[in-house]
Amino acid sequence: MGTRRSEEQNALSSDSEEENDIATTQTKTTKTEVVVSESSRYEQIREQRMKENAERMNKLGLLNLSLNLNLKLNKNKTQRPQIKKIPLPLNQSERRSSRIMSLAPVDYRFKRLKAEPQQSSSSKKRNRVEIYIEEGTNPEVYTEKHEKLLGDCETVWELYVDGYDEDGDRIYDPTKGVKCHQCRHVTVGQLTDCNKCELPQGQLCGDCLYTRYGENVTEANFNPKWTCPSCREICNCNSCRRRNGWMPTGNIYNKVTKLGFKSVAHYLIKTCRTEKSMKNSVAENIVAQETPETSPDSTLNRPIRTRRALRS
């Protein structure tokens, strides 16, 4: 009896499990069917909206407009083949007159001459040299005497070498060096020595003597009659110019050489000579040319021979 009851209980439990499995499978199938139905419904709604949008665009003509624009862009991109122009020969009419058949044909066409390249205003400004010196309290006037006292040199002086090191820097030595009267620098290079005043104002370095007065320091030192610019009254240093009531010139050597002058002193004296001094010098030259040279015999009182004396 016990075995039968246990078998019946097992059969009942297996039946209940099968029923549970069937119920779960049914619920799963219903869920999948619901999901599939929802997705298909969404796709149907999407397709319907796309059709409606396409119909609206067709009604508005937007589809045709976009197609036309694409076609125009493609047409513009295509390059046309370049056709080379062949120059046509000039139609020269045959000459009817036998008299001018042998002559060369005359060309009456107007030919333009090529204009010469003109300098621009900026290049003209660059080539133009302007020297500006402020006016002092006294007028700066030179005479022919000052022009005759201008110096000269036979050999060219090389700038920025004497008194400079290998790197091109100037050597300053306050103990062994000597001060230049022009630039006031205490250097070790060569300096002049005036044979007239024998003062510090006669000591000038080679660069200052060449650029400011056009002279060579080696030639000046070998000349026993050489005198400094201060003794010649042509010194153009700042202190001497201020003492005379003139303003300093500044560094104008490069501009002066571009204008064709040898040094700053040559520029100042030759450009600052007044018309009065020039006229006086010209008049003196004319008088000297007109006066004949008198011999010592001409000073003696000789008798004047006239026609009457000859007749007698």
Image (cartoon, rainbow, N blue to C red):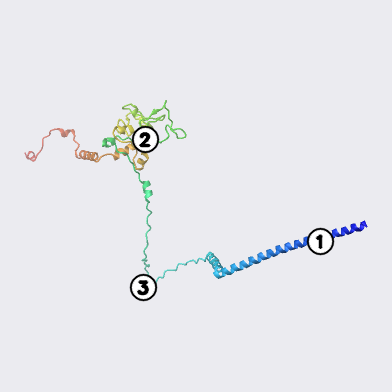
Residue 148: x %, y % from top left: 28, 35
Q: Quadrant of residue 135?
A: top left
CA–CA distance between discs 2 and 1? 129 Å
Callout 1: SS = helix
Callout 3: SS = helix
Residue position marked by numbered label 2 in the rendering: 210
Give the number of the mark in front: 3 or 2: 2
Residue position marked by numbered label 1 in the rendering: 19
Q: Residue furthest front?
A: 1
Q: Amino acid at mark 1?
A: Glu
Q: Are marks 3 and 2 in contact (CB under 8 Å)?
A: no
Residue 275: x %, y % from top left: 24, 41
Q: Are marks 3 and 1 in contact (CB under 8 Å)?
A: no
Q: Amino acid at mark 3?
A: Ser
Question: Which of 245/90 is in front?
Answer: 245
CA–CA distance between discs 3 and 2? 80 Å
CA–CA distance between discs 3 and 1? 133 Å
Give the number of the mark in front: 3 or 1: 1
- Does the image show residue 153? no
Q: Quadrant location of the N terminus?
A: bottom right
Q: Residue furthest top?
A: 175
- Does the image show residue 146? yes
Residue 218: x %, y % from top left: 38, 31
Q: Is residue 122 left or right of residue 49?
A: left
Q: Amino acid at mark 2?
A: Tyr
Give the number of the mark in front: 2 or 1: 1
Q: Which mark is residue 98?
A: 3
